[in-house]
Amino acid sequence: MTVFTPERRSQVMAMLERAVAPPIWNAWGRRLELRETGDNAFQVPAPNEFYRSLLEKELRTKLEDVFRQLFGTVPSISFEVDSGFEVPVTAPAGAPIAVTAPPGQRPENPVQLNPAYVFESFVTGPSNRLAHAAAMSVAETPGRFYNPLFVYGGAGLGKTHLLQGICHAILRARPASQLIYVSCERFVNDYISALEKKRVESFRTRYRSADLLVVDDVHFLSGKEASQEEFFHTFDTLYMAGRQIVLSSDSSPRDIRTLKERLVSRFASGFSVAIDPPTYEMRVAIMRRVAENMHKDLPGDVANFVAGAVHSNVRELVGAVNRIIGMASLSQRPLDLALAQEVLRTERFSRPTQVAVPQILELVARYYGRKQSELTAKTWRKSTSLARQVAIYLAKRHTNLSLKEIGTHFGHRDHTTVLYAIRRIDELLPQRPDLQRDLDTLGQQILA
Ligand code: ADP
Ligand code: MG
């Protein structure tokens, strides 16, 4: 082929359009450049390395096929980073979306948000200012600057609040948005049930047609290879289509254990930002806000005392204030320092016994996708042994029960069996980082 005339170019583009998935074509197609760099040689520019590799993956063979069919030759095509080339942008507000799931395949209630988790109620300070600013920017111009936005930090520091804040803001500004907010656990469970019911296609259509995909607690993918694989493709499809992705996790992308490198690199390819534990001043401000919402005045000494006692977890802080205020109205006592001290002191001592084995069983069964009865059955099946051992291990850790008492909850086993299960987990832990993570996640759920 000698000259790549404008006619030839439109022929190529028209044919390529039919080969490329619509959301990707909408984002890229019209702007896709084919720069002729020599005889039968082309260059395709991309805004950064990440898009470069995605574009190459998506387009190389398709382009080659198109050229072969049209002109009988396969050109040499190189995909190159050209920083002057702009990142594609999501469909404008309110614009019809190219691909949407047929109505029957939409989830009943696709977005379940906590109405309290809005930006307005989020107290900012040095520990979360950057994360907050990035979240605001994403809400204003999704798909543009921070994609994916990856927010990480310890439990109870406001990740979910911030992620849902983005969703609320976007739904307010663009009610027609196809927004999906899910916990990662929900994503994984949806995927598993789609596999079981042979509905993987509709699962894919649903997740891959979102304008904005928000997945909370992606560390949950740790050790779950098939789900990671699925998530990886969902991610690429949306990302290529210029759709905004927002993720949260308890650690930075690189620190999520047993996460495949290609997911790590995707998670880290946009903007990662940490939320740290709140400063003293933020803790006081957060408590004041909670009290205000309940139309109560929080005396200075009470706020100081609680801010000094609960430092590393906003959820606990909010919980403490709620309980102090609740106790004051229940017992009709003044909301003062003595009451606050009393409430916090009793909580410290009573925590371990507040967790009951059935609650642990329920969480563990759900986590591993088992029935509770499988964990407590008289006859033990090998396939459930890990889940059962984990449940026993957590029962030991989070209750004050003796080995014998724990045994009664697990098919009336004697204490040696219980001890064996605990030892077994202890043995496995050093070689199984995914197991450690399971235990951490479950431990958090138990204490939540
Ligand atoms: P995470 O998802 O990081 O575990 P959450 O978002 O669930 O934490 O936050 C736990 C609780 O603390 C929620 O009630 C949330 O509203 C509150 N919270 C966290 N950070 C803030 C903040 N900066 N301002 C106001 N409330 C906050
Ligand atoms: Mg959360």
Image (cartoon, grey):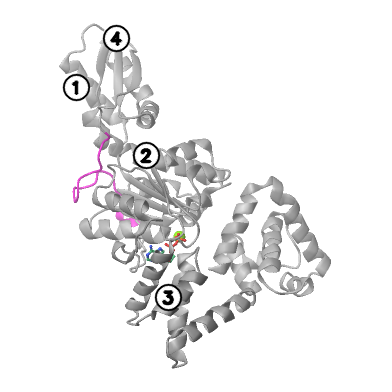
Q: Is residue 90 in the magenta section?
A: yes
Q: Report ligand 2 position as a quadrant.
A: bottom left
Precedes in sequence: disc 1 or disc 3: 1
**Label 2 amino acid?**
Thr
**Label 1 amino acid?**
Ser
Residue that numbered label 3 is attached to: 303
Q: Nearer the viewer, residue 55 or 286?
A: 286
Instruction: Tell me whether the residue at label 1 lies in contact with that at label 3, contact meaning CB atoms closer than 8 angstroms.
Output: no
CA distance separating discs 4 and 1 = 16 Å
> In screen coordinates, is 308 left or right of 79?
right
**Label 4 amino acid?**
Asn
Residue at 20% of width from left, 16% of height from top? 8
- Number of numbered discs visible in the structure rendering: 4
Q: Quadrant of residue 402?
A: bottom right
Magenta extent: 87-104
The kind of secondary structure the magenta stretch mainly shows is loop
Q: Nearer the viewer, mark 4 or mark 1?
A: 4
Residue 106 horizontal/vertical position (percent): 34, 56
Residue that numbered label 1 is attached to: 10
Asked whether residue 368 is in view, the answer is no
Residue 213 horizontal/vertical position (percent): 36, 50
Residue at 74% of width from left, 55% of height from top? 426
